[in-house]
């Protein structure tokens, strides 16, 4: 009999089993292959909502846990579970995986191989969000990088070879740096285990030395910061977005970027609080470069994907600012921001992909007046632009305002500069909307067709609905996130009480 505990591994197993099943399906049966991929991601979406509504905020920190010993001599086991943060990240990934599979109907070349890689990518990210063993957590983290190289290199657009190589090298370098920190934790603990709960318990009762924390924490913060596009390790990101196929851009911006922040919260703050207290204020300075540089760079772009790519680099600065506060409100706001930004960024890339599939261009000067031919897509893009600009009524507004409230006490200068970044964001987003969708119609695009029927409108409408629902009803997620962040800060109160 299946229980909520035994269901958790199916987040990883369902995409992997679907990928293996596609292997035996003949390549010419493209419709069947797509249905298998969509069905698998839909099942994970159902599971994600089940975990969301079954999670008990007042219960134990990690729920739905399962532990299966693997290599006892090294203390390695498949240990999985979800806290409030993990539940929200799993929901985000499930939503984007499903909508990404829906928009992948534009893939015409090697469809079978594409969906095999896509489902492996989906499974690996679920593995990161659910793992409570550092060995498997890192295994899934590295596993998520492997499909990106062929997916961008084969199905990508311009500069795809360069983009796929640069992305792989940057993320792999960051992963190697982080691996040194993880191995240091394993050997310094003396427990001979990779179990995160056991390491966290020891770190609370018998903390690592301050000297150890000071040199180990930056390995993890900046190693994982690479995938989160922390400046100056960001340059791989916009070109990776631009070259990637639509669904990969959606997962890349919506979820993969969030792995870095998630792992810093999951590992660095509970295990190395002294190190976090020393090094995260440095990221509070770097993140302002993210916000302002990324925003100005986005304003200068002519390619729509590069606009959203640099915008994503800019917006991740807000996540780092909330993280650097090292208080309950800041961490809660950061997690909620990751969810809101993930949905918004994925929606933008999905809509750009829809336009590119018909026009074969993403250059803003080549477009214009598309609102007449694409009214539904126009409305969705305007909503995405409003959300990106932090307009009230969207989940992005709630998360950003909470970050500003929590950051003001610790970083007033950075907060003011970050607020100015929103003004720049509104400028380039609204300018792009005007130039692409309004103004005199371009006769070259008179043949364009809007999204038709439920299947055509579902992925975009679903993402819009999520932004609005959690913008109007943010407590649905905030009440799940808050107990986890409260428990984390309270457990390290002795160290963080004097912060900064």
Image (tube, rainbow, N blue to C red):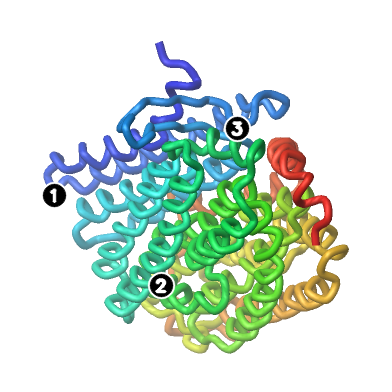
| Labels 2 & 1 near each other (Cβ < 8 A) | no
- Specify the label residue 28 is tagged with: 1
Q: Nearer the viewer, residue 35 or 317?
A: 317
Quarter of the image where the C terminus is located: bottom right
Residue 83 to residue 464: above or below: above
Residue 290 to residue 322: above or below: below
| Quarter of the view holding residue 1 | top left
Q: Earlier in the sequence, mark 2 or mark 1?
A: 1
Question: Could you say whether the residue bearing mark 3 is in a helix, strand or loop?
Answer: helix
Task: Give the spatial CA distance, label 1 vs label 3.
Answer: 38 Å
Residue at figure coordinates x 43%, y 26% from the top left: 67
Question: Could you say whether the residue bearing mark 2 is in a helix, strand or loop?
Answer: helix
Question: Could you say whether the residue bearing mark 1 is in a helix, strand or loop?
Answer: loop
* Residue placed under numbered mark 3 in the picture: 52
Residue at figure coordinates x 65%, y 25% from the top left: 60
Residue at the outermost top position: 1
> Could you say where residue 298 lies in the image, as x and y percent from the top left?
59, 81
| Labels 2 & 3 near each other (Cβ < 8 A) | no
> Could you say where residue 343 lies in the image, as x and y percent from the top left?
58, 55
Task: Give the spatial CA distance, label 2 vs label 1.
Answer: 30 Å
Q: Is residue 79 left or right of residue 318?
A: left
Residue 229 to residue 31: above or below: below
> Could you say where residue 378 lies in the image, as x and y percent from the top left?
59, 67
**Number of other residues with Cα within 10 Å of mark 3, as a class: few under 14, some 14 to 19, many 20 or more:** many
| Quarter of the view holding residue 72 | top left
> Could you say where residue 368 lies in the image, as x and y percent from the top left?
54, 82
Q: Earlier in the sequence, mark 2 or mark 3?
A: 3
**Residue 279 appears in the rendering:** yes
Labels in figure, total: 3
């Amino acid at each position: 009999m299946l229980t909520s505990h035994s269901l958790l591994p199916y987040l990883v197993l369902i995409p992997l089993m679907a990928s293996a099943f596609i292997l035996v399906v003949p390549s010419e049966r493209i419709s069947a292959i797509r249905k298998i991929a969509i069905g698998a991601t839909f099942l994970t979406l159902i599971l994600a909502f089940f975990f969301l509504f079954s999670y008990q905020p007042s219960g134990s920190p990690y729920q739905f846990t399962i532990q299966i010993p693997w290599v006892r001599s090294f203390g390695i086991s498949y240990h999985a579970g979800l806290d409030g943060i993990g539940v929200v990240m799993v929901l985000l990934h499930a939503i984007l995986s499903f909508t990404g599979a829906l928009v992948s109907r534009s893939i015409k070349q090697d469809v079978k191989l594409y969906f095999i890689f896509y489902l492996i990518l989906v499974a690996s990210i679920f593995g990161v969000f659910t793992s409570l063993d550092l060995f498997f957590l890192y295994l899934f983290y590295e596993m998520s990088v492997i499909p990106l190289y062929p997916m961008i290199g084969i199905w990508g657009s311009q500069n795809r070879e360069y983009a796929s190589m640069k992305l792989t090298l940057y993320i792999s370098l960051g992963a190697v740096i982080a691996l040194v920190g993880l191995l240091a934790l394993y050997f310094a603990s003396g427990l001979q285990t990779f179990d995160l709960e056991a390491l966290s318990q020891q770190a609370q009762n018998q903390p690592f030395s301050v000297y150890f924390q000071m040199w180990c924490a930056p390995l993890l913060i900046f190693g994982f910061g690479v995938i989160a596009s922390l400046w100056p390790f960001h340059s791989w990101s916009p070109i990776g977005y631009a070259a990637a196929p639509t669904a990969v851009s959606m997962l890349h911006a919506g979820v993969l970027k969030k792995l870095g922040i998630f792992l810093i919260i999951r590992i660095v703050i509970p295990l190395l609080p002294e190190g976090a207290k020393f090094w995260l204020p440095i990221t509070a300075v770097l993140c302002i470069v993210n916000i302002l540089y990324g925003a100005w760079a986005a304003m200068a772009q002519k390619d729509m994907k590069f606009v959203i790519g640099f915008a994503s680099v800019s917006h991740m600065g807000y996540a780092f600012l909330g993280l650097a506060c090292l208080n309950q409100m800041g961490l809660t706001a950061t997690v909620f921001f990751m969810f809101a930004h993930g949905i918004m960024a994925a929606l933008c890339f999905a809509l750009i992909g829809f336009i590119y599939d018909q026009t074969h261009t993403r250059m803003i000067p080549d477009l214009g007046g598309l609102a007449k031919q694409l009214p539904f897509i126009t409305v969705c893009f305007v909503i995405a632009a409003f959300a990106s600009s932090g307009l009230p009524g969207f989940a992005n507004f709630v998360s950003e305002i909470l970050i500003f409230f929590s950051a003001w006490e610790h970083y007033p200068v950075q907060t003011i500069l970050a607020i100015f970044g929103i003004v720049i964001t509104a400028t380039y987003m609204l300018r792009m909307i005007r130039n692409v969708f309004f103004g005199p119609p371009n006769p070259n695009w008179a043949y364009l067709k809007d999204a038709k029927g439920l299947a055509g409108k579902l992925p975009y409408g679903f993402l819009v609905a999520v932004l609005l629902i959690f913008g109007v009803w943010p407590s649905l997620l905030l009440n799940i996130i808050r107990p986890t962040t409260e428990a984390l800060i309270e457990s390290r109160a002795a160290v963080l009480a004097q912060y900064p």
